[in-house]
Image: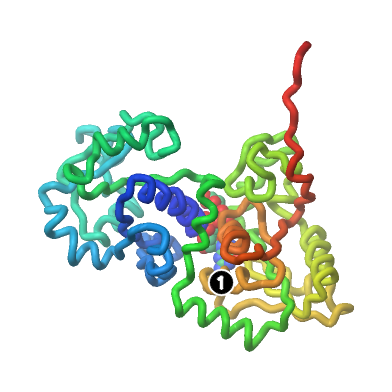
Amino acid sequence: MGRFGNQVDQLLGTISFAKGLDRTLVLPPFIDFAKPGKAQMIPFEDVYQPKFLSQYLKVITLTEFKRDIAPTVWPKESRKALCWSPRESFYEKNAPSGCHAKEGNPFGPFWDYAGVDFVDDEFYGKIEGGYDLSTRGAKSAWNELYSSSDHPVLAFTGAPGAFPSKRKDWETQKFLRWNGKILRSARKFINETLQRPFVGIHLRNNVDWKGVCEHIHSDRKDHLFASAQCLGDHPQKGDFTKEICAPSEKTVIEAVVDKVGSIGARSVFVTSDKDYMMIPIGEALTAYDVKVFTLKDEDPFIALAVLQESDHFIGNCVSTFSSIVTRHRQYSYSQPRPSSYFGHHPRPDQYIPSKKIEL
Ligand code: GFB
């Protein structure tokens, strides 16, 4: 579901599901919507290294699965799609209700890429909690209803992982290590262009984002996308303001100048899906003799890999794209690398809003 940040979020839950059932995870491709028309599939191994993830659970690439496993273990006539409950077809009014696993974009292109057609459907809505194995009885229900001897392959029409991801699954991000080509490009850029210490910032400000931030008001209590990363689960670590979602130029500049000053940064690295604010940031930093850089023809994976390596990262709390960076920094090293968020003024961790008690 969604673009890269959303897909990684759901991947974390999917990893947890496969690990919880002691199943092997067939590494799915990432789905790229950058070009109009049919979604493009990016092989998992072109983005992350399977060997690191295999330190945590059993995995197999889709290529290996298609070549070595599927033809014998999952013969064509036994391929069933697994979805929560039957639904009507979007296109064929008279078709019986079912999973309609290959209907629409990116679903059709996804399963075509996997080389899979389904002969039937299975509905797992009967399992209380669904794919959330922390629900009492869910794990044993999966093992009973879908034992690996009767159902050697579970093929889901949607990722069996929550969105937004659950905090308990965040640490798994450390097993998602960029593919060598991405890492080399990021390190080359850092070594040849940036001077350490450097502050990395993510500015999420394309037109689609404006619509997202309109849903925020001061007494909003529930989360939006990745907002739990700065606000906490309750949420208890600050007020959910519009500035957290769509920081003004003033907020961005103040945060960057403040961080450059406090860590003695010598350069700033900016990524964005729209407005890099290069001129105002550059002007604000002239007094510090600090230069501001971006990647030429920014590749989102390389951009994320550079941000992960920064000495301090300032992200957008609501964006799942930012949360890839913050999770990596939090969990991949013996000492977490520092991150902060535009517009967020943290309250101490232990503060939890108390419920009003009527006496
Ligand atoms: O990753 P994503 O789900 O994060 O979607 P959010 C945002 C996409 O925009 C990324 C591009 O996957 C990238 O393709 N993008 C964002 C960027 N920031 C950058 C950047 O700094 N550099 C580059 N190169 N690309 C939300 C979703 O996006 O957007 C919601 O969570 C919804 O589902 C909403 O779609 C509108 O979480 O930021």
Q: How is the image coloured?
A: rainbow
> Which element carries disc 1, helix, strand or loop?
helix
Tell me if residue 190 comes above or below residue 311 in the rendering. Answer: below
Amino acid type at mark 1: Ala
Q: 116 or 48, which is in the foreground? A: 48
Q: Residue at x 40, y 50 (%)?
A: 14
Which corner quadrant of the figure contains ligand 1? bottom right
In percent of width and height, residue 222 lies at 63, 36
> Where residue 58 appears, x then y in whole percent?
33, 59
Rendered location of residue 250, percent (x, y): 82, 60
Instruction: Report whether 298 appears left or right of 350.
Output: left
In this image, 341 relative to 171: left or right? Answer: right
| Percent position of residue 94, x then y | 20, 33
Query: What residue do we see at 77% from left, 61% from top?
Result: 252
Residue at 62% in and 63% down = 329
Up the image or down, 111 lies above or below 222; here it is below
- One can see residue 159 in this view: no
The residue carrying mark 1 is 305
Q: Name the residue at the top extreme.
A: 359
- Ligand 1 within 8 Å of disc 1? The answer is no
Above or below 131: residue 180: below
Specify few, some or many for label 1: CA neighbours under 10 Å numbering under 14, 14-19, or 20 or more.
many
Q: Residue at x 66, y 65 (%)?
A: 335
